[in-house]
Image (cartoon, coloured by chain):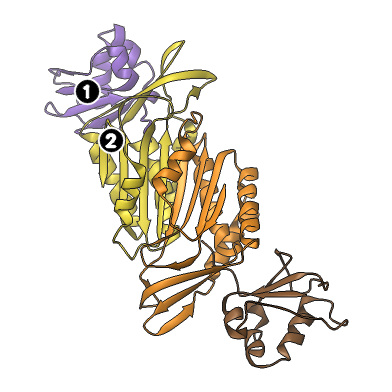
Chain colours: A purple, B brown, C orange, D yellow
Amino acid sequence: MQLLYFGWVRARIGKVQETVNLPTHIKDVSALIKWLKKRGGGYHEAFQNLNLIRVAINQEITTLDARVDPDDEVALFPPMTGG
Amino acid sequence: MQLLYFGWVRARIGKVQETVNLPTHIKDVSALIKWLKKRGGGYHEAFQNLNLIRVAINQEITTLDARVDPDDEVALFPPMTGG
Amino acid sequence: MIRVQEEDFDVGIELSKMTDEHFGIGAQSCFIGLVRDMANQEHISAMTLEHYPGMTEKQLRKIEKEANQRWPLNDVLIIHRFGKLQPGDRIVLVATTSAHRRAAIESCHFLIDWLKTKAPFWKVESSLSGDSWVEAQDNDEREAKKWETENT
Amino acid sequence: MIRVQEEDFDVGIELSKMTDEHFGIGAQSCFIGLVRDMANQEHISAMTLEHYPGMTEKQLRKIEKEANQRWPLNDVLIIHRFGKLQPGDRIVLVATTSAHRRAAIESCHFLIDWLKTKAPFWKVESSLSGDSWVEAQDNDEREAKKWETENT
């Protein structure tokens, strides 16, 4: 799975993107985040407050309970501040 | 009194402006219009529908019952269409 | 600033003048009114704008002042043309600047709504079937009135 | 049309392109967002915009389409910059054209409100005390939501 990070999520994790091999039990975004958070450090810090985390799957905004598939592009980021 | 006409009021009357000597009994805009209307022709035509007549005295919008003085500049015109 | 003039204006230059070297501005809103080539299913060859010199400037300054009182603005610009215009020509430019977008957008909207019913201009449209005066629209009156009661 | 770019744009040229030789347009509304030199009582030396290439274009096209569905528009233009900007620099230009002023004004307002919460940009403000991420504003969310329920 391709993971992308933006804004302070990217800054805290210290990576723009990475490719991960998901354990098969991970079916949705929430589970993915929980799994990432276990890595500790920047990951733990980035995902401390899930109210501030937004997600896009294959470049479409969705919710944290959305299903993820191994070939998805999943982006995690803070609320957008365009304009 | 200085009279100014704009829009189709001007077009119907056929004058941009004129100076008139008011009879002393004319105290407000309505009476002024009535007096002008008596001249017939374009004046009669211009002031047929008072709902469509707007007035400014000394360049300030006011109402048809406003008082007029001999040294006023009185402008009569249709509803404004700026912008 | 307000300007009443016969000649065209350069939108880019006018908008830049309002923001260049003004580093506290976060938002600029603008509206441009243009002459359309159609009215009442007829092709328009020209639009001629007549106005009340002296009073026009007074009214525009009043409207400008009103906008400045209602919203925290850095600047207001109103340029209104008169004379004979062609389809596609610019008639009016309204622009506002503010630290915040809401003040800029709402005040610009307010200004153009008030110009419609409170600026002493009258328009003639010329077509093959002759000249006809542009009538004031009921909804222009309604939209201008909205700003009299609305809390901003 | 939508454009996502690092370089500045010329507002006058962009606005003229939308109206020149389009004789049915009566109204053009535009909004320009600029970098302010102050934020939270601190002097800002730069603002850096990060975005999500690919998704940004998708989202802007969606927002553009939504505006075209809601209002009878001739054209929509959104230009959004990214990269490192200075105070006074333009960030975004939104412009709409229509036969009628109300459609142009409301759609332009809609577009900038939606951009605030739906365009994948993130901003860092640099000041003497360091860099800090611009937080999403609750009222931005509220103003964007307004357009979801409001009848237009």
Image location of residue A70, percent across then percent down: 12, 26
Question: Dot 1 falls on which chain?
Answer: A
The residue positioned 22% from the left and 23% from the top of the image is A4
Q: Quick check: marks 2 and 1 in contact, CB under 8 Å?
A: no
Describe residue D103's horizontal placement relative to residue B74 as left or right: left
The picture quadrant where one finds residue D3 is top left
x, y (%) of residue C108?
51, 49
- Residue B42 pos. (x, y %): 63, 89
Is tag 2's residue or tag 1's residue first in the polypeptide sequence?
Answer: 1
Q: Which mark is residue A4?
A: 1
Residue at 23 percent of width and 14 percent of height: A15
- Image quarter where the C terminus of chain A lies is top left
Chain ID of residue with mark 2: A
Q: Could you tell me the amino acid type at mark 1?
A: Leu
Q: Residues within 10 Å of mark 1 (few under 14, many from 20)?
A: many
- Find the distance from the CA under tag 2 to the CA under tag 1: 13 Å
Q: Amino acid at mark 2?
A: Ile
Residue furthest right as drawn: B24
Q: A41 above or below B32? A: above
Do marks 2 and 1 both belong to one polypeptide chain? Answer: yes
Q: Nearer the viewer, residue A1 or A82?
A: A82
Q: Residue at x 37, y 59 (%)?
A: D98
Residue carrying label 2 = A61
Front position in the image: C30 or A62: C30
Q: Residue at x 47, y 39 (%)?
A: C17
Q: In the depicted view, which residue is nearer to us: B26 or C137?
A: B26
**Image quarter of residue B40:** bottom right
Is C31 positioned to the left or the right of B63 in the image? left
